[in-house]
Image (tube, rainbow, N blue to C red):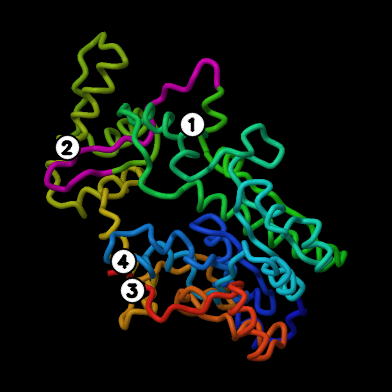
Amino acid sequence: MSPMSDAADLAAGPLAGVRILDLSRVISGPYLARLLADLGADVIKIEPPEGDASRLIAPRHDRGMSAKFTFVNVGKRSMAIDLRRPGAAELVLELVACCDAVVENFRPGVMERAGLGWVRIQRSNPRAILVSLNGFGSDSQWREQRAYAPTLHAAAGILHDQSKYARQPVAQRNDAHADTVTGLHGAVALLAALRVVESTGVGQRVEVPMFDAVLGTYSEAQTALLDPPDDIVMNPIYDAGPHGAIATAGAAQLVWGAVARAHPELEDPTPPGADLALKARLRHQALERWMSSQLSRETLAEKLAEAGIASAPVTSLEEALTGPIARERGLLVEVDDRRGGTRPVVRSPARFSASENRIRGPAPRCGEHNGEVLRQLLDYDDDRIQALVDAGILVEAAENESTP
């Protein structure tokens, strides 16, 4: 990694000059590496011959270059290497010698069995950083457990906690929260390790278990350990009739008190001597009637703001992505879908005053940059590249990633 010295380098991205070898698959590791690619790093993605599994996690018409694959792999270069072939690990280690960091998200032991364990990586490049994302940690009795976001949500307790909070049956989340939050922690750790390399010249292995990352980021983890437990009703959602559902921030009793003080027309419906549960229910219903009676959603928002209450209408994800706030923020970026059209991708949120954090290209086809990377980084000629293809180590890029 060379030091960045001028404004042109900063405009190219705060991580211009950093090279990442992304061996990871599906979401957690690829998301980590995508964040670094947006920041200007050269990310080389190593895929198996059949491609990353996330290419196929999609409706049939979207398989190959799926929305999920595109989201976590924009701006990368792809090589297709069959790690089961003799000599494949040695090729990857040659690439390691040209990179600042390696990202992987296999179960503990898989990298060693592939000939790509930490000892061999460090021997190939003493300055290299290895970021390992896994389910429960290499020193855990659960180390061999397959870990995916849906099962981590259950094992880490957040499905149960959300069910208890919402007073609804247990239901799975509709996102890969465990993956993305682990990727974020991994990105922070990788950047910190790069700082150590700058100071010492020595790389290191960093492990980020998904279980630890989920609980280390879950804001209610400490509250769950209170004795007696916290039974305050927080952040109520109200049915405002023609104005839709309205979410508020704060304890229910504080929301009631603030609105009642600011708007005296809101009368307390609770009879003398009512217990707390009855008070809460009747006041919630009274607030819903009051909200429904307002002339418009905008009028309601103004009156809640006058009471010092933070609120927002409950909108659909599609509305949020295409609505006025997202348009104002320039949140969606159209990228080449590799099928003759474009598709929208949400940009990374951090905005720098003197650097660019942006999507730097489309998601790659599987193995699209085999020759380009080997010529550029390792000075391979065509004959040597063809020999790798003939040996089954290198898989030639497919022309069309779509699956009919």
Locate residue 212, reporting x and y percent: 61, 40
Distance, label 3 to label 4, CA atoms, is: 11 Å
As helix, strand or loop, the secondary structure at mark 1 comes to: loop
Q: Quadrant of residue 79?
A: bottom right
Q: In the rendered view, does 365 fall on the left or right side of 299?
A: right
Query: Label 3 is placed on what type of residue?
Result: Arg
Residue at horizontal 64 percent and vertical 75 percent from the top: 14
Q: Which residue occupies the foreground of this view, 287 or 387?
A: 387
Which residue has dot 1 on it? Answer: 157
Which residue has dot 2 on it? Answer: 290
Residue 62, disc? 4
Query: Label 1 is placed on what type of residue?
Result: Gly
As helix, strand or loop, the secondary structure at mark 2 comes to: helix
Distance, label 1 to label 4, CA atoms, is: 33 Å
Between circles 1 and 2, the one closer to the viewer is 1
Which residue has dot 3 on it? Answer: 343
Verify whether residue 182 appears in magenta.
Answer: no
Locate residue 181, reporting x and y percent: 53, 50
Q: Which residue occupies the foreground of this view, 82 or 331?
A: 82
What residue range appears in magenta?
226-246
Locate residue 121, reporting x and y percent: 77, 62
Distance, label 3 to label 2, CA atoms, is: 42 Å
Q: Which residue occupies the foreground of this view, 372 or 314?
A: 372
Q: Quadrant of residue 2?
A: bottom right
As helix, strand or loop, the secondary structure at mark 4 comes to: helix
Q: Quadrant of the C terminus?
A: bottom left
